Amino acid sequence: MLRSLKTVSVIFALTALSLITASCGSGGSTQIRVVDALSNNTNNIDLDVYINGSKINGTPLGFGQVYPGQKTPAAYVGVPSGSDTIEVFDTGGTTTPIIGSISSPLPLPQNLSGGTQYTLVLGGSYNNTVNPPTPFLFPDTLPTTTTGNVYFRVIDASIYLSRVYSDGLDIYFEQGAPGIGGTPQISALTYGTTGPGTNYVSVTYNSGSPEITAYVTAHGNKSQSLITFTWDSLSNEEVTTLVIYDQQNGSFYFPTMLDYTDLN
């Protein structure tokens, strides 16, 4: 279940974001879900997301929220395949964006195929020219699940942690919350990326002892957990996406993660 915390206000534009679809014969529209992790805005206004001039969200998107809302399996909104323009404004606004445009190169794939699902994370900082509002787009390629395992993917959208820990973050998933283990399942995760790669890490699941804890540490230093996040109600073969992000005012990171189920 998505843990949405507060709302943030933004005027955020991603004009001239080219989404070029390869002609692979798969047909159908591209499907996108949008996560608002854009920090450092104090006006507390939610977001409206436009693709090719049409608003795609039926309800305003608040800080820490996902659109469409959390469902299992994950819900998406269909958008045209091909070259799309994406714009994000303060709710109710459709005029000049606060930044001009963000165009290639971007830390995201440029070729979106019809019938493919993606997560678009709105990251960056509203009032920071060093880390301006930035889109991070990730294909949602679900794993082939097997009994006795659960699966996790982590997206790093924290400017604060990237600044303090420039070598990245390590993530350990431990069953039964025994403490930090020997080897992280995800190593040196950096801002604007997902790990491991674009895949999901598999973690052993025991229905008799279902508790699993994620520990986020500085890369190469497991003496201190920056984030400790525990589940006690996961289901066998469940697939989860996590987002590391900053507090609404941008002054610090959240000691938890956005958590939503991709498949259950």
Image (spheres, rainbow, N blue to C red):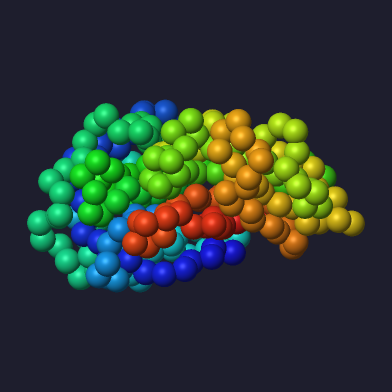
Answer whether residue 255 is visible to the viewer in this image. Answer: yes
Residue placed furthest toward the right: 208
In the rendered structure, the answer to whether residue 50 lies left or right of residue 175 reads left
Q: Nearer the viewer, residue 131 or 13?
A: 131
> Looking at the picture, how far across and down is residue 147, in whole percent?
81, 45
258 w.r.t. 225: above or below: below
Residue placed furthest toward the front: 223
> Looking at the picture, how far across and down is residue 13, in whole percent?
21, 51
Q: Quarter of the image for the C terminus: give it.
A: bottom right
Residue shown at the point (55%, 44%) measured from the top left: 154
Q: Quadrant of residue 148?
A: top right
In the rendered structure, the answer to whether residue 178 lies left or right of residue 100 reads right
> Looking at the picture, how far across and down is residue 143, in whole percent?
64, 39
Q: Nearer the viewer, residue 100 or 69?
A: 100
> Looking at the picture, how far across and down is residue 62, in whole percent?
37, 67
128 w.r.t. 249: above or below: above
Q: Nearer the viewer, residue 21 or 64?
A: 64
Answer whether residue 151 is visible to the viewer in this image. Answer: no
Count of all numbered marks drawn on residues in the image? 0
Residue shown at the point (59%, 52%) measured from the top left: 227
Residue shown at the point (30%, 33%) measured from the top left: 106
